[in-house]
Image: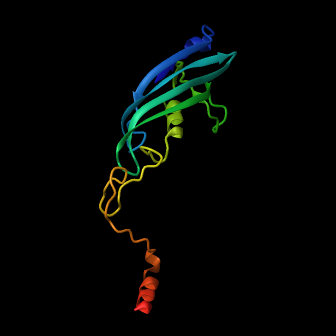
Amino acid sequence: MKINILPLLRGEKDNIPFCFTDDMRGFSPDITEGSYKAEGKVKNFSGYMLLEGEVQAEFFATCGRCSKSTKQILKARVSRPVAQTLTQEDDDYIIASENGELDIREALEEAVFMEIPVRFLCKEDCKGLCPKCGADLNNTSCSCVEDKTDPRLAKLREYLNNLEE
């Protein structure tokens, strides 16, 4: 998303609004479909320019425990300074091109990335799938016998069972 900020640079306007929507696929392998909407302004405060806005995303993602598709909603705020030239290499400025175009996509996508969880869940108390039979433990209970013995202690268990006999 590119914005022409020449009117800001010339002093003709004190802010330039923006609004656009883009696809969420590619943000995470777990996101199956959805989009985000970004709205905000690039403001000029007597030579100091600032990108401010909000990103709202609505998408479907795969639950990390039971593999169901689940609807997710997230919001992120963006506030980044804008410059015509980079003064120091580690500055967090968005740089406008020579023709006055400002590409804000990277700043907006970065804000969304920072809000995406490591693992999506359909609900906080999702029980997931049985590791043996694959049954969805949220809907049914399975008849699998769960052996809670730590495999590192299997020989000790064997030894203790032999002593009892």
Image spot of residue 7 (x, y percent): 57, 11
> Which residue is depicted at the point 38% across and 68% down?
146
- In the rendered structure, the answer to whether residue 108 lies left or right of residue 145 reads right
Residue found at the very far top of the displayed protein: 12
> Which residue is depicted at the point 52% across and 36% down?
110
Classify residue 131 by image quadrant: bottom left
Image quadrant occupied by the C terminus:
bottom left
Is residue 4 positioned above or below 136 on the image? above
Image spot of residue 8 (x, y percent): 60, 13
Classify residue 62 by image quadrant: top left
Of residues 36 and 58, the one nearer the viewer is 58
Q: How is the image coloured?
A: rainbow
Residue found at the very far right of the displayed protein: 46
> Which residue is depicted at the point 63% across and 31% down?
86
> Which residue is depicted at the point 37% across and 50% down?
138
Image spot of residue 37 (x, y percent): 45, 25
